Image: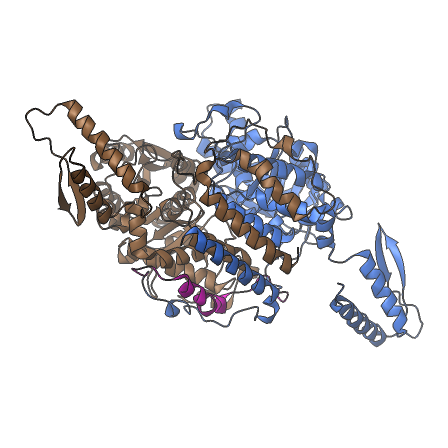
Chain colours: A blue, B brown
Amino acid sequence: MDTAEFRRRGKEMVDYVADYLENIESRQVYPDVQPGYLRTLIPEDAPQEPETYEDVVKDIERVIMPGVTHWHSPYFFAYFPTANSFPALLADMLSGAIGCIGFSWAASPACTELETVMLDWLGKMLKLPEEFLAGTEGKGGGVIQGTASEATLVALLAARSRILKRILNDDPEKQEANIISRLVAYSSDQAHSSVERAALIGGVKMKKIPTDCKFAVRGEAFQKILEEDKAAGLIPFYFCATLGTTPSCAFDRITEIGPICNAEQLWLHIDAAYAGSAFICPEFRPLLDGVEFADSFNFNPHKWMLVNFDCSTMWVKNRSDIIGAFKMDPLYLKHDHQESGLVTDYRHWQIPLGRRFRSLKMWFVFRMYGLRGLQEHIRKGSNELNEALLKKINSARTIHLVPCQLAGRFVLRFAVCSRTTESRHVQEAWAHISKLATELLHQPSH
Amino acid sequence: MDTAEFRRRGKEMVDYVADYLENIESRQVYPDVQPGYLRTLIPEDAPQEPETYEDVVKDIERVIMPGVTHWHSPYFFAYFPTANSFPALLADMLSGAIGCIGFSWAASPACTELETVMLDWLGKMLKLPEEFLAGTEGKGGGVIQGTASEATLVALLAARSRILKRILNDDPEKQEANIISRLVAYSSDQAHSSVERAALIGGVKMKKIPTDCKFAVRGEAFQKILEEDKAAGLIPFYFCATLGTTPSCAFDRITEIGPICNAEQLWLHIDAAYAGSAFICPEFRPLLDGVEFADSFNFNPHKWMLVNFDCSTMWVKNRSDIIGAFKMDPLYLKHDHQESGLVTDYRHWQIPLGRRFRSLKMWFVFRMYGLRGLQEHIRKGSNELNEALLKKINSARTIHLVPCQLAGRFVLRFAVCSRTTESRHVQEAWAHISKLATELLHQPSH
């Protein structure tokens, strides 16, 4: 395929993508296929001679689409959201074309620098404490990981390395294997399976703290186990708190856990993969209170912030902690600027060596939505929409409601007022409200 | 941005990408910028209100391109090649649009199944032993990792898990921490830094075997250290051999190392990240002899096989070994087909949980190049081209050569024949050949 053909095929693909996303609602969200379906549809071997592009393209609908679970269908309510937006798709096309491997500053300065600055932009949107930002002189900063699992693991490895250095510094005679066998990490009993897996990979114990009736870890529950473990000769070194658990979107009480971690010199990592995007809205930001106690914080813009997978953003207060867990510098990866304070070599911040130019998607999305547009996406509905709904309800005259303002949001109050109201009246009212809300959302202006 | 605007902007982006790649030779391959250049070119914060697409696009040349190291410039000879082809770019556009997260079979059957079949296709192109293929009943199979670093780490973790199970099975009284402290992994002293890093992450010792004058590990050198280590009470469990080292493209002697690993029950992982693509050509396939002794094998089609980053292909003989190192199944990731032998849940094969639909790029590239086209790309030049060069040399009458055939290749023989030939004659002849070859390659037909 030469450049001229790419121009033509690329434009056809843009139309195919646009058609797919425009009409995705008409496709069955979960496929009917049985395991092994695909192998029977294509040859057993790669072709010896080139095929034409037409041959390949016609197989997309024949071979691929029948087996796709459509994550971007509005009827997809499984697992978790994964972001998809037109600006991010465009940025990824550019990233593919540039195709640089940004493992060090010199390997493509723009790739590294845009990432650092985008993580600062996003950190400011979240109102993260100053220490998490890189700026031009900061000790902290952010990095794009592929997934939250990797962020959890990288934080655990950094914590393991930090505690080992601390203990061996105090007593160089101690055996590393003996120390590691006594290390213990903690998480909520609601934490994602990847947290336990990080401990398995790092070869350390992981204990799950029982949660309260809201599925949250409280300081008291943690403190109790911590004391027992210390008394038993274990060395607590890492706590992975979750803000927005996978099963129920519960929030560990980091304002209670944080001070304990700080007092006991445990690394506190906060995993907000799922819920974190919401913290850019002032009304949700209080859920992040306590982040000031953390050593590292992570969430996934690729879940709920319109940036296509993969883009899991992670910040640390001390980048030397994270680099210390990994740093290795063979000659073929050295470059002139390496010792400059301004230079970041992201290969020391992650498990893989190679990395794509992923910050372009953040840049495109942040600029084309603006903070206001991103907040609207999180809120999925405006004050104006709520006001229109109330007007529609009251115009219909079937039920009657009045509104209130709560923290700047226009809220519809539903009060059970009459002595004669029974359960069936409330149920009828809810059915009526739902019907009117659905009608409103189907109006072309929304 | 609505769908209509995406259609327009997407087509503009296709043209931008085509222009960029068509004219990349005219851009300076390594940028002039100093560390910190980018931060001064863009605002300190994300915009509050949306910007237009024009605003964003005009900044690509102003902000990004001045800081790009152009990996696809024909003048780029640093690090290693990273693949880029039009079919792969088109497939990645489609992958972005589908935007599924293929961590399990059910999360998108097509994503998982195409990957399994593409790894079988590629395995057959490499003539891997049958045990590495999934087929419909095999115990082995392949997976796409992000990078070779991850493949090395995953193999090491699987090996660590296998040896632990074996020892604890024989003697359940043994302490896991004590076993881990005695484990020792091996690699060449020429191996990539990521190999040492894998051992650091896995918390095990790594020893580097001294190489011979061709920078290759020989069986004898390995056997010597192995015996010393066993005598010292260590437990050898993993060898990471390199086929095509990063510094000099040296090849460890796996026909010598392999039988030792098998006899001593060490996990043998072969890392051919850089050179592996060449094994699809029959004349280079002997370099892979000995792969039959390996437990796992990995190379990067994203380096030299026209599949854009990231696509690092890894095969294992026993997928239960690799799954055993990671498997965890929370309820929200369970699905009906999980116990079927045909179903692969790739999240158990890798470090991250999430994964993109990366096999599409392999499918597009394999089909649009065909095996023959891929072999030609590796060979970078055909028999016909060599014949044309010889004709050109002999027509010019300055020097005289005759050809030969070696294993199906048309080879130009250069024999020093005359009694009066001196060094300067050879040098002049080489300059002449180089000049004619360059002219030939600049002819529009090549």
- Give the percent coordinates (x, y) of residue A171: 50, 23
Please tell me whether residue A75 is drawn above or below residue A290 in the rendered image: below
Task: Name which residue lies at 35% across and 37% down.
Answer: B184
Q: Is A243 positioned to the left or the right of B202 in the image?
A: right
Q: Residue at x 30, y 56 (%)?
A: B371
The front one of A97 and B183 is A97
Front residue (pair A125, A201)? A125
Image x and y of residue A198, in percent? 51, 45
Q: Is residue A57 magenta?
A: yes
Which span is picked out in magenta?
A: A47-76
* Image spot of residue B384 (x, y percent): 22, 49
Residue B132 visible to the viewer: no
Residue B266 quadrant: top left
In terms of depth relative to the viewer, which is nearer, B441 or A144?
B441
Asked if residue B291 can be seen in this view, the reply is yes
Horizontal and vertical percent position of residue B430: 21, 31
